[in-house]
Amino acid sequence: MLKNNFSGACSLPLPVRFVNAAAWMISKATIEKVGVFHPVFYHYGEDNHYSSRLQYHQFKIGVLANATIIHDRNDEKLSQEKLLLRKLKTVPLYTLLDIRKAFPVAYLSGFLKLKRIKKKLAPLHSKNIDEVFREQKKWFTVKLKEAIQIRKESKKVCQSL
């Protein structure tokens, strides 16, 4: 049984597929094997991509039900448009780069997510939305070789940091 100095007995970790990176406790051995966040993700999506890499390399992800995490940041209320734009910038890419999935499945899933999110944003008729869509669509066309290379690199055990 794990012990937590703040609240007494702590449960064993409950297995999950994803935990937001703001709440991670990760071992040095894990980082030595899997590496660090990939630089293709500026902000948002990097933890999803890293989680898929962890699971590919046979690491488990879990949460402690009675643990408390405080993520010190501004409590920003995002509009539906901003939330969907954030998804448009990240979800298709981390889906395409998900090495747990065979490449054809990851490609098709990511491309369909790209189209679905764009469709949800269509009523807003924003030039910004069109620009973000075109930029993200490049990962499925002209930047596809780069995506394939990132997938290959992600499958390798990290050699050095």
Image: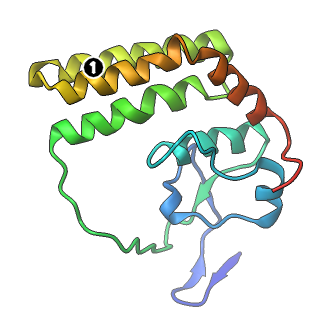
Amino acid at dot 1:
Lys
Could you tell me residue 15's position as x and y percent?
61, 50
Disc 1: which residue = 118
Residue 34 vs residue 126, the one in the foreground = 126
What is the total number of numbered labels drawn onto the structure image? Answer: 1
Residue 128 vs residue 12, the one in the foreground = 128
Query: Local crowd at mark 1 within 10 Å, few (<14), some, or many (≥20)?
Result: some
Secondary structure of the residue carrying tag 1 is helix
Work out which residue is located at the far right of the displayed protein and give it. Answer: 159
Q: Is 103 situated left or right of 81 in this image?
A: right
| Residue 146 against residue 76 in the figure, above or below | above
Identify the residue at horizontal 23%, vertical 16% (top origin): 119
Residue 32 vs residue 134, the one in the foreground = 134
Identify the residue at horizontal 22%, vertical 30% (top origin): 128
Identify the residue at horizontal 26%, vertical 34% (top origin): 84
Quarter of the image with the N terminus is bottom right
Quarter of the image with the C terminus is bottom right
Residue 133 vs residue 3, the one in the foreground = 133
| Residue 9 against residue 89 in the figure, above or below | below
Quadrant of residue 48 within the rendered picture: top right
Identify the residue at horizontal 19%, vertical 50% (top origin): 78
Work out which residue is located at the far bottom of the displayed protein and give it. Answer: 5
Could you tell me residue 18's position as x and y percent?
54, 46
| Residue 9 against residue 71 in the figure, above or below | below
Quadrant of residue 70 within the rendered picture: bottom left
| Residue 10 against residue 152 in the figure, above or below | below
Q: Is 87 situated left or right of 58 in this image?
A: left
